[in-house]
Amino acid sequence: MNSNFNNIHIIAIGGAVMSSLGIALKKSGAKVTGSDDKIYDPALSNLQQNDLLPAEGWDEANIHKDLDTVIVGMHAKTDNPELKKAQDLGLTILSYPEFIRSQSEHKQRIVIAGSHGKTTITGMIVHVLNYLNKPCDYLLGAKIKGIDNTIQLSNAPIIVIEGDEYFTSPLDQSPKFLKYDHHIALISGTEWDHINVYPTADSYIEQFELLADSSPKAGSLLYCEDDRMAMIIGSKERDDVRAIPYKTPKYKVKNGQFILDGEHPLKVFGKHNMQNLEGARKLLDLLGVTDQQFYEAIQSYEGAEKRNNLVQANDSSAIYSDFAHAPSKVKATVHAVNELHPDRKLTACFELHTFSSLNKEYLPNYADKMKYADTAIVYYNKATLEAKGDTVLSTDELKAFFNEKNLLVFTDSDELKNYLNKQNWKNHDLLMMSSGNFGGLNLSELADNLLS
């Protein structure tokens, strides 16, 4: 780590990435303090285990002239008292992308971007490099099975960064991924998201164009040509920038397992993951990883912890959970489970939980995204909707938004649980998709009841 940063305070340390950054910095030998007004698990437990859990709330006393830098997260507001004091004292204030950039000055910087697939592709690249004992630093937006931390900062010659298109900080409304000054970038796909900060699809897509246009001379830009906008952005002529397209490779499904290129059995599944895997392979080729090395290493990759997660299974049924919330992710996840067991009936249940998914202007983007399910269910918590200042969504409205005339709609988790308990689960799979928790529904207990 850069020795100029020995005494660090993190405002809004309770976020997933911010808490991981704090822990990584402490492990590297820095003195780290933090603050936040609300902290939830898993960040709460992780900070506690590493003696970094702060008292709740903001405290100006945390900010003093001995700090080398203050790192500020998006959860903080511009009028945050700690941020204002840091400004008054003239301290160095960095967003976490700016801090990561400061730690990677002499590294080859690789940024993986896209509205879907970026966590998986970043995780695949890091997994393969780790498998081959090739040192690398990385920044992941979610926990990957087999990779201990979501952030690693060392003296490695390269850093692989999951590039987020969301705002950089309360003081900087440009997307995070523009702060890293990449040498290699990959765009997996572009589907309108984050409507609270990008009110139109065009304003969202523009951020990926800016990323591509910022590619340096002699740099490389990889893009998925199966995604229309990614192909348009990626194939644009740019002086001395190498454009590298990729698309879904050949694969087959045999006995509930995806097999790549006819002979490489995988632990992940779904067409979208085959596409992600091809993007990782093409990028790793630029780092000197041969196809033989890649195929050997990727067979042990298990994916992100909250993606395509098998909760429980028996000989004729399986129950999966997934963090899917954006339209493209919902469609890809439903299709993946359908492909895995094509002879079984599939019930897919999706919780409307995010700002975007509860917005009537955005909801039409979910049309046909659950078409691969035999039974499609949408759940939302009325209290969550009311907290966002919106009115109740009617069943007829949701049927129209999802283009599913037989769509089932639940707003009570007990009623949803009772419905699921009454179904016959022989030769029948269940997929539960949410970035929330279905009103506190315990999926492990549910699986025990359904498969007993």
Image (cartoon, rainbow, N blue to C red):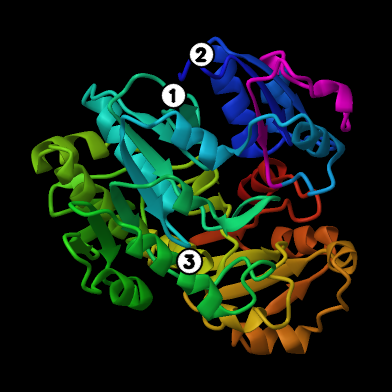
**CA gap, disc 3 to disc 2?**
33 Å
The answer to whether residue 382 is above or below residue 290 is below
Q: Quick check: marks 3 and 1 in contact, CB under 8 Å?
A: no
Residue under the point 25% across and 38% down: 299
199 inside magenta stretch: no
Tag 3, which secondary structure? helix
> On the image, numbered disc 2 is attached to which residue?
28
**In the image, which disc is placed on residue 153?**
1
Quadrant placement of the C terminus: top right
Q: On the image, numbered disc 3 is attached to which residue?
A: 207
What is the crowding at mark 3: few (fewer than 14 residues within 10 Å), some, or many (at least 20)? Answer: many
SS for dot 2? loop
Q: Is residue 12 above or below residue 369?
A: above
- Distance from disc 3 to disc 1, alpha carbons, whole Å, reads 27 Å
Residue 89 visible within the image: yes
Q: In this view of the protein, which residue sits in the foreground, 171 or 377?
A: 171
Mark 1 → mark 2, Cα distance in angstroms: 8 Å
Q: Amino acid at mark 3?
A: Gln
Taking depth in this image into account, of 111 and 267 the one nearest to the observer is: 111
Instruction: Indicate left or right for 290 with 27 as reference.
Output: left
Quadrant location of residue 57? top right
Q: Position of residue 203 (x, y in %)?
A: 54, 75
Residue at image position (47%, 24%) is 148
Q: Quadrant of residue 222?
A: bottom left
Residue 63 lies within the magenta run: yes
Q: Amino acid at mark 1?
A: Leu
User: Which mark is on residue 77?
Assistant: none
Q: Main secondary structure of the magenta part?
A: loop
Q: Please say if the residues under marks 1 and 2 sit with CB atoms less than 8 Å apart.
A: yes
Work out which quarter of the rendered image holds the N terminus and state it.
top left
Task: Provide the residue span drawn in magenta.
Answer: 49-74
